[in-house]
Amino acid sequence: MDPADTFIAIRNLAKHYTEGDLRRTIFADLTLDVPRNQFVALLGQSGSGKSTLLNLLGGIDLPDAGQIRIDGRLLTDLSEIERTRFRRRHIGFVFQFFNLIPTLTAEENLLLPLELNGLASPDRRDRALELLDNVGLGNRRQSFPERLSGGEQQRLAIVRALVHDPLLVLADEPTGNLDAATGERILDLLLALHRQAASAIVMVTHSREVAARADRILVLDGGRIREAP
């Protein structure tokens, strides 16, 4: 791949965990390039390191060795505070269990990333609320998450992840807690918003059917990563 086209560059990544007296290798010498705006699905057995890789890409955790570069920024050289700021501004997260703040309304949950990034101008707030309308939640703005269905909560979680125009969206089993029909609609929404926002997506999934919608399928196995056949 032409270096100019590389958005995510992972080089010689290693990550280990200590469990009692045992040292467990999650990755060993993992290297990967992802171009800008690509939608990548990440498959692998339970415990293969899929969520760990998302945490590393999001700067939540650090590798034991190797480098992660996102849009030219060497994430692994940043301090914890710098990684937090980078993550808050440039990365959006979508989780299987939504991770909405229960004491905030749908509108307040949606606007929180703008508030945290100092982006809550009247124009940006209007755009955010228009996005809420576009996903069918305009009439649920003042509802708290417990009053929303699972599909509605996930729609809210997706637009919250994208409201601040992140460079990268990290999605961890975003349809895994939903029924098949709702999951399909959520995936359609994520793909539509991805195309509009022109952001890269790395999505962990256990479903081959979901993965088939991606531009590229990668498999984590034995601490290595490979292209799916």
Image (spheres, helix red, strand yellow):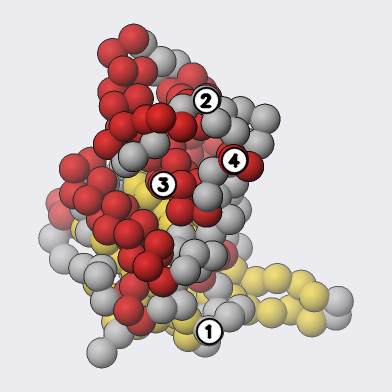
Sooner in the amino-acid sequence: mark 2 or mark 4: 2
Q: Which mark is residue 155?
A: 3
Q: Quarter-wise, where is residue 41 in the image?
A: bottom left
Sooner in the amino-acid sequence: mark 2 or mark 3: 2
Q: Which residue is mark 4?
A: 147
Callout 2: 10 Å neighbours few (<14), some, many (20+)? some
Under tag 2, what secondary structure? loop
The quadrant of the rendering that contains the C terminus is bottom left
Is 52 above or below relative to 137? Answer: below
Look at label 4 and name its amino acid: Arg
Sooner in the amino-acid sequence: mark 3 or mark 4: 4
Q: Which mark is residue 45?
A: 1
Q: Single out the mark in the foreground, 2 or 1.
A: 2
Task: State the separation of the CA atoms marked 1 and 3.
Answer: 27 Å
Q: State the residue lying farthest toward the top.
A: 122
Q: Which residue is mark 2?
A: 142
**Label 2 with label 1: CB-CB less than 8 Å:** no
Closer to the camera in the image, 81 or 98 = 98
